[in-house]
Amino acid sequence: MSEASYPSLRNRHVVVTGGADGIGAALVAAFARQGARVTFLDIDDDRARATLARVEERGGAGRYIHCDLTDVAALQSTLRDAMREWGPVTVLVNNAANDERRDWQVVTSEEWDRQIGVNLKQQFFAIQAVAPAMAEAGGGSIVNMGSIIWKLGSGGLPCYATAKAAIVGLTRSFARDLGSSNIRVNSVLPGAIMTRRQIELRLTPDAEQSILRGQCLKRMLVPADVAPIVLFLAADDAAACTNQNYVVDGGWS
């Protein structure tokens, strides 16, 4: 597909969490093509290096930093170091997540805390780390990646679905708190996106047919389908867009 050009993204410092693979890798590549300086955080070193190599082969400016996002002190320290090197973050994409399946009857307290840490808590503390400098720079854009899973009422993912529903509240709260600093906060809710992980772990013929029955669009969606709305929300073209949730699901929900 063709990609719109957003001159306002050129040379901006963009941070993408969970950027080594899947939707995150597509976002890293898309921002790099716009001329942004992209820092991405992850723990999958091999796939991160491959993503960075693809960006650099195409002349993009990217940097990978290994970081366990569930370690709040490490996350915030990493973001502060990144800002000292490349300047204030003016676009933050909270993308990292883990859609682990689990029967609610056997979820332990430790598992609950771990899943909330991966899917929700790190988004809050990433924003807390970058927002002051973003405000001093004159504003910016924060995009929190949610999911349609809670809208569908799907079972088998109690921790993940709860966290993704909470991202809507997180987004709306920060949009109100940060709006006076010209910081826009939105969320994007993808549907069934055919990342490498989903294809390897979830995609069976029955699952594919179920997805296509649910969607209005009768094709499987891929990470490149998500990147355009995130680019738009990050750019000055979306200067009046905040406090909203944008769905990319082929019409499923």
Image: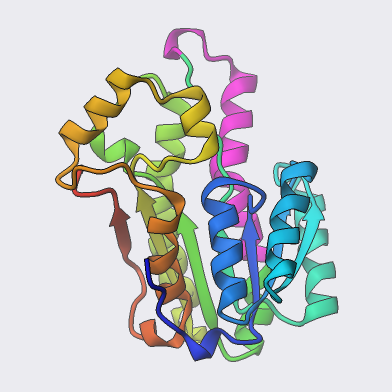
Quarter of the picture holding the N terminus: bottom left
Q: In which quarter of the image is residue 206?
A: top left
Query: Is 62 one of the magenta-colored residues?
Result: no
Q: In the shown orientation, is residue 214 left or right of residue 157?
A: left
Q: In the shown orientation, is residue 246 left or right of residue 7?
A: left
- Residue 54: give x, y in percent of width and height: 69, 61
Q: Nearer the viewer, residue 137 or 152?
A: 152
Q: In the shown orientation, is residue 32 left or right of residue 240?
A: right
Quarter of the picture holding the C terminus: top left
Q: Which colour scheme is used?
A: rainbow
The residue under the point 63% across, 30% down is 114
Q: Can residue 100 be seen in the rendering of this structure? A: no
Q: What stretch is highlighted in magenta?
A: 103-129
Q: How many marks?
A: 0
Prevailing secondary structure of the magenta residues: helix
Q: Quadrant of residue 76?
A: bottom right
In the picture shown, does residue 251 fall above or below 2? above
Q: Can residue 20 be seen in the rendering of this structure? A: yes
Q: In the shown orientation, is residue 147 left or right of residue 110?
A: left
- Residue 191: give x, y in percent of width and height: 33, 44
Q: Nearer the viewer, residue 208 or 247?
A: 208
